[in-house]
Amino acid sequence: MPADMFRRSAAGSPASYSPIEAEFGDSRQKLSPLETDNSVLAALGIRVAYGDNRVLHDIYCHFPATSVTAIMGPSGCGKSTLVKVLNRTLELTPNAAVEHGSVLFHERDIYGPGEDPLEIRKRIGIIHQRPVIFPMSISQNVLFGARFHNQFDGMRPRDYAEKYIEQVGLLDEVKDRLNDPASELSGGQQQRLCLARTLANNPEIILMDEPCSAIDPIATERIEELISLLRERYTIIVVTHNMNQAKRISDQAVFMFAGRIIEAGDRDTLFENPQTELAQRFIQGHIG
């Protein structure tokens, strides 16, 4: 990419960058990875706007089954918008609209006629940046969606709740307090509780929108350990600002800038041999 595609300070430092006439190339080539036969989810030509403001431009990407994909990029580049598109939670945002494109889940368009958004959100769960805790007990938080979707499969509700609380490593910490308000938990515990609630819905894909940005380093380590364990059974897509975290947890990586996917591929290739100047500068810490 030519150097004049970026704004520079008067001293020539890389303190400020934005595309002027950026030649982003053919967005259809930004698939992750380019060749795969086990893709479970794919975004094809997605364009999104908030009112008159276009925020995603012709997004093409797909995600292999039972793997972890990290979506990276500077603030405001469209990462969180993209993950909300992937399970139809974006439509809960006023004035937000998917203007063009489709999202294929097992080759079926989740935005197609007759598709039930509640069922889609059950199968493609999402963990938000800040824990979303309901005003009820710890156990009832876990059971909230599972009860709606009839997931107990003959188990007692308490046993069902404990099963998923244990899966996220929280049971030993709360086993004597399951009827206490979930709001009394620490931030890291609340985030693991949200993960337990998502798992209790029996999803196939888990979206995580910067799940560690609002919790401490010890809680972050626990979340990363859970991601490593869960990758064997689930497809996981994680939005993160933290490049070191992306290196630790991901199999694939996607780099976004200005509402576009600039580069995507396996983690090691993107971090060790980025093909675009934008990706190089982001990895070097000059864009963020």
Image (spheres, rainbow, N blue to C red):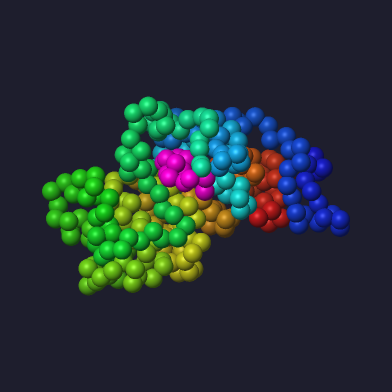
Most prominent secondary structure in the magenta stretch?
Answer: helix
Residue 141 position within the rendered picture, expressed as x and y whole percent measured from the top left: 28, 59
> In this orientation, which residue lies closer to the viewer: 59 or 162?
59
Which residue in the rendered view is the most extreme toward the right?
10
Is residue 179 found left or right of 281 in the rendered image?
A: left
Residue 162 appears in the rendering: yes
* Residue drawn where x is 71% and y is 55% of the image: 286
Bounds of the magenta span?
80-94
Q: Residue at x 24, y 44 (%)?
A: 149
In the image, is residue 54 above or below residue 240? above
Viewport quadrant of the C terminus:
bottom right
**The quarter of the displayed image where residue 116 is located:** top left
Tally of numbered discs: 0
Report the residue at 53% width, 30% height from top: 100
Q: Kindly indicate the quadrant of the structure image that contains residue 175.
A: bottom left
Residue 246 magenta: no
State whether residue 266 is above or below residue 230: above
Taking 123 as reference, is 84 left or right?
right
Give the x, y percent position of residue 51. 56, 40
